[in-house]
Amino acid sequence: MDEEYYIALCEDPVQFENASSVNNVFFDEANKQVFAVRSGGATGVVAKGPDDKSSVAFRMEDKGEVKCIKFSLGNKILAVQRTPKSVDFKNFLPDLPHIEFSQECKTKNAVILGFCWTNWNEIVFITDQGIEFYQVLPDKRSLKLLKNQSINVNWYIYSPETAVLLLSTTVQGNVLQPFAFKNGTMSKMPKFEIELPVVPKPAKLSLSERDIAVATIYGQLYVMYLKHHTRTINSPGAEVVLYHLPREGACKKTNTLKLNTTGKFALNVVDNLVVVHHQSSLTSFIFDIKLRESDCAVNVHQPVLPARSIQPYSIPLTGPTAAPSQAPVPCELFNFALYRYLWYLQVRLQPTLNLLPDKGKLMDFLLRRRDCKMVILSVCSQMLVGDEKDSLPVVATVFDKLNQVYKDYLDAEQSYTVVSTNTFTFVLYI
């Protein structure tokens, strides 16, 4: 039965406390940490990450309701927002006192929408009137303004992997202004417009942050727009539109992922695959933007595999009321807010052997995945022995692809050797 499921939840999720009247729960995308803040921090704060190094427990003074809480990289400095005008900081560096200090936003009458750490000691405040980029000076318990930019902001999304901040601007919200951060510098990138399916009149906010995600796919940064359509004869349903956002140059629409249905969706990127979860059918689709359908336009993609549900997952019962003989409770998939767990999503490759009959396409798909070697050996074995032997042209196609990958590897290795040798000779000559 497990051979039907090519998407699964990780076996060791992060467990955290339930949200309640005395306990608030926050998630920090950059550090992958879940914060449980009890009584404003007075009775304890527990931050749990994917490993023990990123987990920490501490107390802080209750100075009001916590709106946002995040550690800088390496858990060196804690930032806490309690008011619309300021952010509080607390050192967790060795040999420095754990005394809080505060920074108000510089822009008059502005409201802080949130903040993002761009380095262990650099932070950007996002307000409804712009952004303010600061260097945090932990020994002086103060902040130094490095740069600010005035711009009307509806909402924002931050990519911690690339340190790129995306701001929604204009009345309709579909003009996105990116900023890049690196080593104390803030660079304004070219703005771009998301194409809306319907332009409202009079103009109103029409693009929500719920329909936008940013992700790195095959080493490139993409803005993913979940574009909803009413399903008709001329429009088969919703689609995910990808905009490539380079470090230099204009952002361009490059790919369209056809979902062929309507409803509520959620997006993930796993192993360079875009995974789209469809709530009403309890199934997921996966797309590989490097695979193209022969009967589609160049950058229009259909799901690589038939839609499938996530592999069933059972939660073990714990606590004083749990009896040793009690069976684990099945997890209600696609309704993860009910549980006190944070999972990583995984793609299982073995089931794809029976779901993707085109061996050439299957090989293209597998060769781009992590931990693919044993599955590729299974494909070769399936082709050459047993009752399911393939024709010689199919075998030739598969081995041509394997040989091409090996040739590319040898060419890259040779180029690296030549560059290293030339560099070494140059250094000697100097």
Image (tube, grey):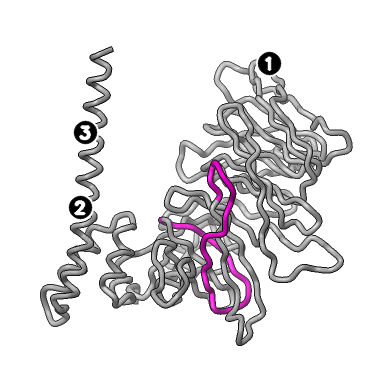
Residue 8 versus residue 165: which sits nearer the camera? 165
Q: Is residue 337 above or below residue 74?
A: below
Residue 217 placement (x, y as % from top left): 46, 53
Q: Is residue 228 above or below residue 242?
A: below
* Amino acid type, callout 1: Lys
Residue 112 placement (x, y as % from top left): 78, 41
* Residue beneath disc 2: 406
Residue 251: in magenta span: yes
Q: Quadrant of the C terminus?
A: top left
Q: Relative to 9, is 426 on the left or the right? A: left
Q: Earlier in the sequence, mark 2 or mark 1?
A: 1
Q: What is the span of residues highlighted in magenta in the rendered image?
A: 245-271
Classify 10 Å Cα crowding around label 2: few (below 14), some (14-19), many (20 and above): few
Residue 159 placement (x, y as % from top left): 57, 45
Q: Secondary structure at mark 3?
A: helix
Classify 10 Å Cα crowding around label 1: few (below 14), some (14-19), many (20 and above): few
* Amino acid type, callout 3: Thr
Residue 225 versus residue 421: which sits nearer the camera? 421
